[in-house]
Image: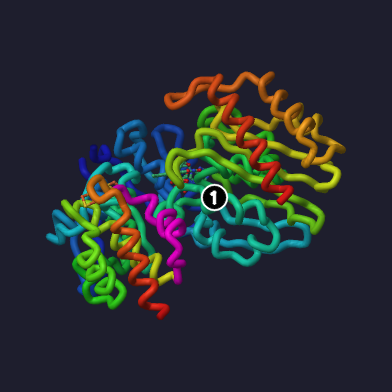
Amino acid sequence: MKVADFHYERPDSLAKALVLLSRDDADVQALAGGQSLMPMMNFRLAQPDTLVDLNALEELRGIREAANHIEIGAMTRYAMLEASDLVRKHIPLFSIALPHIAHSAIRNRGTIGGSAALADPAAEMPALLIALNATITAVSTSGERKIAAKDFFLGLYETALDEGELIKSISVPKALIENRFGFYELTRRHGDYAMAGVAIAAQHMAPLTGLRIVFFGVSDRPLDVTAIAETLEGQSATDTDIVEAACRAIGNQSLHGDLNADAATKTHLAQVVLRRALRGMNA
Amino acid sequence: MTQTCTITMTVNGEIVSQQVPTRMNLVDFLRNEVGLTGSHVGCEHGVCGACTIEVDGVAVRGCLLLAVQADQASVTTIEGLANNPTGRALQNAFQKHNALQCGFCTPGMLASAVEYVEGGGSPERTAIREHISGNYCRCTGYQSIVDAIADVLENASS
Ligand SMILES: Cc1cc2nc3c(=O)[nH]c(=O)nc-3n(C[C@H](O)[C@H](O)[C@H](O)COP(=O)(O)OP(=O)(O)OC[C@H]3O[C@@H](n4cnc5c(N)ncnc54)[C@H](O)[C@@H]3O)c2cc1C
Ligand code: FES
Ligand code: FES
């Protein structure tokens, strides 16, 4: 289908974009990479009155190094993250996961801010941001505020953003030399949304400490499973009894089925991805 | 009332300037307004890859970009790829390996392949498959497409 008619604006400053987005008498939506919004508009699942195209806003684009974190502008595209030396050096988990997000032509347009704002429960980026303890900076005409990634994703396509608020940037703590990361996802075809996936960040590997284990594609939001992290804390990731105990802990979570797999299958798949991600960290 | 915008872009080296409805996507603009019907339209939601074209040097989905967003951009469609040595080498390799049957996927497949080859992609088959994972082909079963792309990469390196 073709998109329904809409009014198009391409502001050249963030301040102007925020004013346009603050209108509450019409359905005004921000357009980032368009890799989710345009399909939704083509399906007519979304029919905004006005689109505010953020693509001219250079101030929202870029990857900057600070003392302890990397600050990423909301309009930074996946392809820019993939090509960035700063990301490779300081956010190794991104480098492992990025090739799994959609396909190259989609990554050439899709943005980190768009992915976070969309909050698709099967998307990789929200899970990565929680696992890495990232902080989201939101901005509106009334000012800026910071939201921890763990408090940002509230449900299916639901975030802590208020009406008229944009994601301005996302800050990700730099990895320390002793940190270890794991990632695994199961898809029908490379680049598809995951049927189940997991992102793992560990402060130390042997023994495992300071773990954060976040699943995606198995619930209505990224699932940070502290019970599994607790089972593994202080243990060895090569101990199969421990890994199996951690897998059993997923069985106690109530996972959500979808069109492709019911909840029981999701539970099985979550165990498979956890086992494989931990094995990948040992290698 | 439909909002329109006047846009100017370079398409295969030629300047095109026209008034378009803001709701028109880039691939419809190229096909219906500019008359370049080489780019195809399949799913219109980013999944099939038939509409893949090059905008400012990178492969993108023509169905997910509005024509107004390509204002001031440089666009290369399949019609322009024949002027690019990599594009021509790939077209020849596709013919040699029978990498197309109905040809519906081919313009998008070539656009993705050009980006891969020019970006220094590896001739390894799994890497090629990953790169073209966003382009559906309902005819060939992909083997011959991978053969053709690998052929170009191996010839370039030898
Ligand atoms: C074929 C296909 C396969 C895909 N596979 C995957 C996959 O495997 N994994 C995955 O994670 N994604 C996948 N995607 C989606 C892709 O990653 C999108 O790019 C991403 O989800 C949204 O980013 P965007 O920049 O394109 O945002 P848009 O589509 O432009 O916007 C999405 C939503 O976010 C809002 N928004 C955008 N930017 C901001 C901002 N800065 N502040 C506030 N709100 C904002 C918009 O208003 C809109 O509601 C796929 C897409 C396609 C077409
Ligand atoms: S028509 Fe654009 S991806 Fe299918
Ligand atoms: S040749 Fe027919 S779809 Fe690929």
Q: Specify the quadrant that holds the N terminus of chain A.
A: top left
Where, by quadrant of the figure, is residue A121 drawn? top right
Residue A73 image offset from top left, x and y in percent: 58, 56
Graded by Cα atoms within 10 Å as few (under 14), some (14 to 19) or many (20 or more), the crowding at tag 1 reads: many
Q: What's the residue type where badge 1 is placed?
A: Ile
Residue on which the image places disc 1: A112
In this view, B135 is above or below A268: below
Where A10 falls versus B77 (above or below)?
A: above
Q: Magenta stretch: give its range.
A: B120-136
Q: Position of residue A162 (x, y in %)?
A: 57, 34
Number of numbered discs present?
A: 1
Q: Residue at x 30, y 64 (%)?
A: B148
What residue do we see at 76% from left, 35% from top? Answer: A240
| Horizontal and vertical percent position of residue A235 | 85, 37
Q: Is residue B141 left or right of residue A275?
A: left
Residue A188, image quadrant: top left
Does any portion of residue A117 appear in the rendered image? yes
Judged from this view, the residue extending furthest toward the bottom is: B158
Q: Is mark 1 within 8 Å of ligand 1?
A: yes
| Residue B85 included in the magenta stretch of the image | no
Label 1: chain letter: A
Residue at the (78%, 30%) spot, across then down: A241
Label 1: which secondary element: helix
Residue A144 seen anywhere in this rendered image of the structure: no
Q: Which is nearer the eye, A126 or A49?
A: A126
Magenta stretch containing residue B129, yes or no?
Answer: yes
Image: A64 above or below A144: below
Out of B18 and A199, give the one closest to the viewer: A199
In this picture, is A156 found above or below A39? Answer: above
Q: Position of residue A37 (x, y in %)?
A: 40, 41
In this rendered view, identify the residue nearer to me: A54 or A207.
A207
